Image (cartoon, helix red, strand yellow):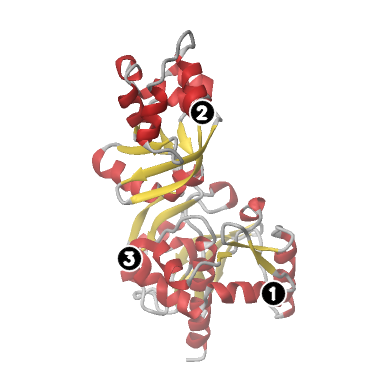
Amino acid sequence: FLIAGRGGLNLTHSEPFDKFLTRYGSRRDRIEPLLLRFTPDDVRAWASDLGIPTFVGTSGRVFPVGMKASPLLRAWLKRLDEAGVTFHLRHRWLGWDAGALKFETPEGVKLVHADATILALGGGSWARLGSDGAWVRELERAGVKVEALKPSNCGFDAAWSPVFREKFDGHPLKSVALTFGAFHQQGEFIVTKEGVEGSLIYAASAKIRDEIYAQGKAVIELDMAPDKSEAQLREKLSRPRGSRTMASHLEKTVGLKGVKAGLLREFVSKDDFADAAKLAAAIKRLPIPLIAPRPLDEAISSAGGVTFESLDETLMIKNLPGVFCAGEMLDWEAPTGGYLITACMAGGYVAGQHAVGCLNG
């Protein structure tokens, strides 16, 4: 929660609910019933009830006033403490032992017999905070079907030349548009030594990742001058450059320099660079091959997890009565923008309500 707050704690998104639901892709039918029970508006109301009002940013994302996670977390923990919740810290779940929950603790191994259990163990992309996916083995051992954990909202490797890698590592690409299949969006991202990362890449990461897994690579198209047409670029680039270098000509005529010009040099041949029409086309549709997603532990979130087929509509594991699952350990994914936290909270709400029902018979 505090790590999510480093960028201001994006709790949810203010866009219309129908559009909000589309962000869950192929798992929309599984996530929608949860979000109908605990909506983006309910997330805002929850924060407000804890004394932390929220506001809508220019992008439509919703943040707590003050842009900090710690005041909200403190208020939340205070409420839970006053409600009688007991926290057992430094306990690591090791699975089951003859039906009892087995924990590794500072005092040794403990067994706990529970009338109802909610597993909210996270995905696999934050091992240093405990979300290392070690639970996968225990659930599979108990006969639960789990899809392999995969990086989501992640960067990708590209086979840069040594010169480009050293010169442009860490340089941002701003005001560009990325196209990949049906995906088309304007934004920005960063070139790294390994490849690419950043918000625009994350937005398309699920589609790019799946293409790489299926085909061995994925080729994105980059429009480095989305405010200019190809015809405009062609006309400007056709002007005589006199004694100017090609780099100077690019900057003076169409405003391309630095990493954008470097990308053109990386993927456009010398002959095509001298052809105004081909250069203009490359500026508008530069193909960039990506060869692998970055490792799971570098990703913002993870895909894969407990399959919804293993759960009933209350999020209880079918073959483990009284055991519920919630959060990122389920087999779904979403882009950044408040969608991850909102769906995690919605799943937690539904699992919690039904766990209470289980206790009450």
Cα–Cα gap, marks 1 and 3: 41 Å
First of labels 1, 3 by sequence position: 1
Q: Position of residue 130 (x, y in %)?
A: 56, 53
Identify residue for label 2. 255
Between label 2 and label 3, give the one nearer the viewer: 2
The quarter holding residue 42 reads: bottom right
Work out which residue is located at the far top of the displayed protein and give it: 243
Please state which of residues 320 and 13 is positioned toward the viewer in this rendering.
Answer: 13
- Say which amino acid is labelled 3: Gly
Q: Are marks 2 and 3 in contact (CB under 8 Å)?
A: no
Q: Quadrant of residue 224?
A: top left
- CA neighbours of label 1 inside 10 A, class few (<14), some (14 to 19), many (20+): some
Rendered-image quadrant of the N terminus: bottom right
Where does label 1 land, which residue?
A: 48
Instruction: Identify the residue position indicated by label 3 in the image.
Output: 143
Q: How far is disc 2 from disc 3 in space, using C-alphas?
A: 59 Å
Q: Give the secondary structure at mark 2.
A: loop
Q: Is mark 2 in CB contact (under 8 Å) with mark 1? A: no
What is the three-letter code of the residue carrying label 1? Answer: Ser
- Which-is-in-front pick, marks 1 and 3? 1
User: Label 3: few (<14), some or many (≥20) within 10 Å?
Assistant: few
258 or 298: nearer the viewer: 258
At x 41%, y 70%, the residue is 31
Mark 2 or mark 3: which comes first in sequence? Answer: 3
Q: Is residue 65 visible?
A: yes
Q: Position of residue 299 (x, y in %)?
A: 49, 46
